Image (spheres, helix red, strand yellow):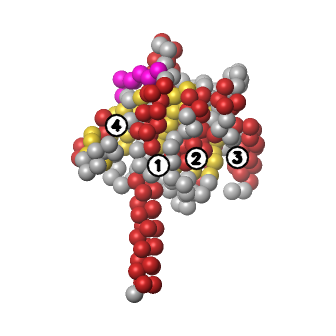
Amino acid sequence: MTGDAGESLRSRKRSHERSLALTSRHADSAPDARCPAVSVILCTYNRRGLVGRAIRSVLAQTFAAFELVVIDDGSTDGTAEVVLAFAARDARIIYERHANRGLAAARNAGLALARGKWVTFLDSDDAYAPDHLAARIALVAARPVDALFGGVRFVGRRPLRYVADVERPGHKIHLAHCHIGGALFVRRAVLVRLGGFPALPYAEDHELMKRIEEGYRVARCVRRSYLYNLRGGDRMGIQYLERQRSRRAGQHALLARRAA
């Protein structure tokens, strides 16, 4: 990372230095008039060909008082160059890269940088309809809630809409009955108090939502403006699981050869 783009990124990162720790002081601080209403956290890993579409869908929002925090989970395919090209043209975009840690850790890294009163998410193979943020801001303005869920439109083949059911091992569940992490729209203070997403390899959004429902006001958004891309095996969480399985298989093979 060199030149003007690199310096621009370093400048933005310095300006967010005070937001790097998830503390109660960070969560309960008085709102700054310069802070955005919404922080969109976009996590990505090796999505050079898809991340641009996701970013464009955020920049096309009819509600413009947002910041876009892009967390690169260790991409090696040129994803960084794509994101930095957008960041050079729009100061609302913040880019952070770290070693590969998985989706939950990436989202928590974005939460540490977020400044908005509300936090929401977008996976880099998904997209927003143009009124996605506006619909949710209107809903939280009309009723006292701490979190919204739902409002997902599935794009792709129907067989891919079924995933492993975390509460019924060996069974599958339709995605419409799942909590989709990208569609969560939550007060930042709530997420910080709960410690962000739990460090789980699968269904971390389900576990977080259960904790939110136990102590906070929750409502469903019926406007299906989160466009969930059903590309088999290409989800960021699935990618991380596959890499972990591959590492474990390699370790077991090595141990077997040594024991032979």
How far apart in space, not on screen, are marks 4 and 2 (Cα)? Answer: 24 Å
Q: Please report the residue visible at 57 percent of the width from the left and 51 percent of the height from the top.
A: 72
| Element assignment for label 3 | helix
Q: Nearer the viewer, residue 140 or 95?
A: 140
Task: Give residue 39's position: percent from left, percent from top.
Answer: 58, 32
Question: What residue range appears in magenta?
Answer: 217-224
How far apart in space, not on screen, are marks 2 and 1 (Cα)? Answer: 18 Å
Q: Residue under circle 3?
A: 9
Q: Residue under circle 4?
A: 178
How far apart in space, not on screen, are marks 4 and 1 (Cα)? Answer: 16 Å
Disc number placed over residue 200 in the picture, else none? 1
How far apart in space, not on screen, are marks 2 and 3 (Cα)? Answer: 13 Å
Mark 2 residue crowding within 10 angstroms, few (<14) / some (14–19) / many (20+): many
Disc number placed over residue 211 in the picture, else none? none
Q: Is residue 31 magenta?
A: no
Q: Is residue 210 visible?
A: yes
